[in-house]
Amino acid sequence: MATTATPTKTKPKAKTTSGAKPEVAARQEVQSTAKWVRISPRKARLVADHIRGRSVPEARTVLAFSDRAAAIEIDKVLRSAVANAEANHGMFGDDLIISAAYVDVGPTIKRWRARARGRVARIKKRTCHITVKVVQNPDIEPRKRRAPATPAAPAETPSPTGEAAPVEEAPKKTRTPRPKKDDAATAKPAAPKPSRSRQTKGDR
């Protein structure tokens, strides 16, 4: 009995076009972290949720008018992240946005408190780790901070022989001593002291 082979269907290959768009380069992300902050993570997360996705000037305004104690610590971390971006990467602080702001749980400090009938109650002092990340705002054209201008060195004038002419140093100013006057000529005559005659008992 003859067997016939059935043809297998092959999937068509995907067409590649030469005009494909290149992948967008990832934006540079700068972060700052504060560890072992003596605040409950739940309380700090309530503040971090308010600034996530905002621009840096807007986030600073929100933290400045917040009544929660965690706003002070988060503001310190935000300022540190902006300072890292400006000093290490040449970014401009007002052109950044907060891409991520999250709070992790830190170690819990355990303390005890005396209660009635010789018992004790546990006190949990919680800590947290705060992280803030900033990136360049895509809606604003990036601008770099200007480097401080350095004074240009004076150009050396070559001598006729081809060697650099030695730089002449400016003469140092010296103080001329004042002429001393004769002590005897300038001395004022001492005023005569009044003579006080000693009186005897008979003269009184």
Image (cartoon, rainbow, N blue to C red):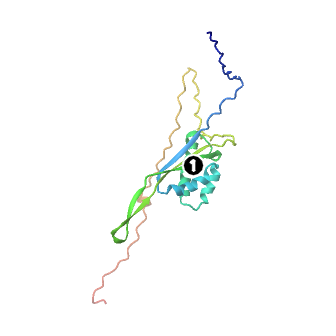
Q: Compared to 180, does 120 lie above or below?
A: below
Q: Position of residue 121 (x, y in %)?
A: 39, 65
Q: Compared to 132, does 158 lie above or below?
A: above
Res 19 → quadrant: top right
Of the 4 image quadrants, the one containing the N terminus is: top right
Q: Is residue 201 visible?
A: yes
Res 114 → quadrant: bottom left
Res 136 → quadrant: top right
Query: In the drawing, does residue 178 fall left or right of residue 97?
Result: left
Which residue bears the numbered disc 1?
A: 101
Of the 4 image quadrants, the one containing the C terminus is: bottom left
Residue for point 54% across, 25% down: 164
The residue lying toward the viewer, choosing from 108 and 152, is 108
Query: In the drawing, does residue 115 fall left or right of residue 87?
Result: left
Q: Given the current orientation, which residue lies at the most extreme front position?
A: 1
Q: Position of residue 54 (x, y in %)?
A: 64, 50
Residue for point 63% across, 48% down: 53
**Badge 1: residue crowd in 10 Å (few <14, some 14–19, many ≥20):** many
Residue for point 48% across, 44% down: 174
Q: Position of residue 6 (x, y in %)?
A: 65, 15
Q: Amino acid at mark 1?
A: Ala
Element class at badge 1: strand
Q: How many marks?
A: 1
